[in-house]
Amino acid sequence: MQLRWLAVLGQVATLVIVHFWLDIALPLVQMGAVILFLVGLNIVSLLRHHKQNTVTNTELFLELLLDVAALTVQLYLSGGATNPFISLYLLQVILGAVLLEVWSSWALVLITSGCFIWLTTTYRQIALPHAHSNDFFSLHIQGMFICFLLAASLLVLFIARINHNLRARDAHLADLRQQSAEEEHIVRMGLLASGAAHELGTPLATLSVIVSDWRHMPALRNNPELVAEITEMQRQVDRCKTIVSGILMSSGEARGEGTVHTDVNAFLDGLVAEWRSTRSPRHLDYTNVFGASEAIVPDTALKQVIFNIFDNALEASPDWVSVVIGRQRDAIVITVSDAGPGFRNDILGGLGKPYRSSKDRPGSGLGLFLVVNVIRKLGGSVTAKNCEEGGAAVTLSLPLAALGAGGRGGS
């Protein structure tokens, strides 16, 4: 359609120059009608494009045939095969070779060849004025140069656009392949975690029974220090059992767990309170400015994802962590800030890539990798930056629709 607009402008300019400047008589009414036909064709194409983006090979083939027909009529009215602009057939063939299926391209070659042959014998002769009667060859050469320049320019523009689209497609495919590899990695990790959770269930249950028996043994019950330590051991075992249950729930293997219906503020307030009680940060600044709450059904993995961000911030900055809950249109925005050393540039450049971490220990970097992929699966995004005053900030943006919110206040 863009090339057709250029063709319309080019034909109008050519008619004006040839008819009024070179004083060569042309059938302006008939040739103007062809130009109006091309304008109408482009308007119809634009309306159809707005209704549906997908274009079939048959539609493209018919559009190019109409362009060939319009060019053939214009050439018939202006000298036939003697018109230097007859080389524009080659432009139509090249466009067809790029855009169409093989059979359609060859059909276009045969049709344009037939039109060329027909124009060698059937056409309206151009009546040259006396001033140009002896200069026909020079005019022909000039017309050939203009045709060459026009075709070359259009081909450069068109092929450059095609190459740009191909590069964009290749980049998109590379991103999809990378995402597929990351998701496969997550599946393997999920299977490993699920299997480990099953294996850990039995020894944790055994430990829980043993510790409970210790609490009732007279020799230990009368020692306050041992009782305190046993109580702490029981608390840690219970916490391990809760973590294992969470892993099984996230993998869809939890039994007897109903769907949890809650709202944004209750879910996030409770999540922060639980994290505060289990991690005991020295100073936690928590601000919730979400506003009117929305009903949600939180994903089972979301709690662990947010905990992971909190844990990373606490590890980088044990003395201070800030959590701000906000809203941006129909999305929950969670910003977690710390006063630590910040992210390295290579980590910021490859945010969410596995095994990229400033922690020099095996397995580091998987937490943020899982966070990014889980949030992406839910339709959200994760961004990170180093703050000017020091420290770093990680922002999670999660659409309410991904959590079952219907855009109305929940209850």
Image (cartoon, rainbow, N blue to C red):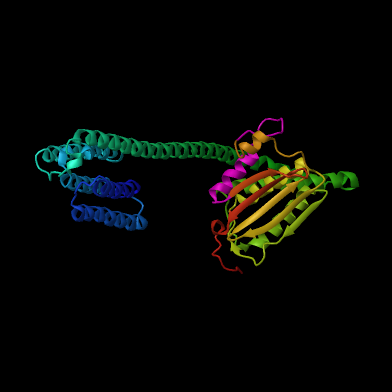
Residue 130 vs residue 351, the one in the foreground:
130
Residue 6 vs residue 371, the one in the foreground:
6
- Residue 344 at x, y = what percent? 69, 35
Q: Quadrant of residue 119?
A: top left
Q: Is residue 71 above or below residue 45?
A: above
- 323 horizontally vs 397: left or right: right
Asked if the stretch drawn in magenta spans residue 360, the answer is yes
Name the residue rendered at 41%, 40% in the picture: 165
Residue 323 vs residue 89, the one in the foreground:
89
- Residue 100 at x, y = what percent? 27, 40
- Residue 251 at x, y = what percent? 56, 46
Magenta residue span:
354-380
Residue 276 vs residue 104, the one in the foreground:
104
- Residue 204 at x, y = what percent? 69, 42
Q: Is residue 206 above or below residue 266?
A: above
Asked if the stretch drawn in magenta spans residue 261, the answer is no
- 348 horizontally vs 115: left or right: right
